[in-house]
Image: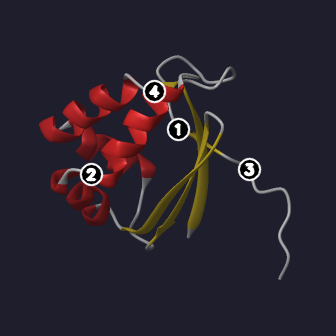
Amino acid sequence: MRYCLALDLKDDPELIKEYERHHDEIWPEIVESIRSSGITVLEIYRTGNRLFMIIEANDQFSFAEKAKADAANPKVQEWETLMWKFQQALPWAKPGEKWILMDKIFGLS
């Protein structure tokens, strides 16, 4: 399955550079938490301060199970707290919502 999500960064060039530096050296515990959830490919793209994430996952992947595992993992919580220094919710996000799942509106096969 493929999922696409969006999130904004704070519109500050220095914070954006720092955010990208963190992703050049992502913590191994974060990589492990991603892989162990069933995610096989994860890519993040940026334009301006808008982020776009593509996830490819196996049939066992569940956003609910990933969220549950992340909530129980202190290192993931530390990473998420650090990342929130750079991120900001999309204007239409619900309280506490970060990455928002996008709706596919077109596909060319």
What mark, if any, has residue 26 been given in the picture?
2
Q: Is residue 79 visible in this depiction of the protein?
A: yes
The reply to whether the C-beta atoms of the residues labelled 2 and 3 are less than 8 Å apart is no
Quarter of the image where one finds residue 8 = top right
**Residue 82 against residue 108 in the figure, above or below:** above
As helix, strand or loop, the secondary structure at mark 3 comes to: loop
User: Which residue was labeled with disc 1?
Assistant: 99
Mark earlier in primary sequence (2, 4): 4
Quarter of the image where one finds residue 92 = top right
Mark earlier in primary sequence (2, 3): 2
What mark, if any, has residue 14 been given in the picture?
4
Q: Nearer the viewer, mark 2 or mark 1?
A: 2
What mark, if any, has residue 34 been given in the picture?
none
For marks 3 and 1, give the CA distance.
Answer: 13 Å
At label 2, the amino acid type is Ile
At label 4, the amino acid type is Glu
Badge 3: residue crowd in 10 Å (few <14, some 14–19, many ≥20): few
Q: Nearer the viewer, mark 4 or mark 3?
A: 4
Q: Nearer the viewer, mark 2 or mark 3?
A: 2
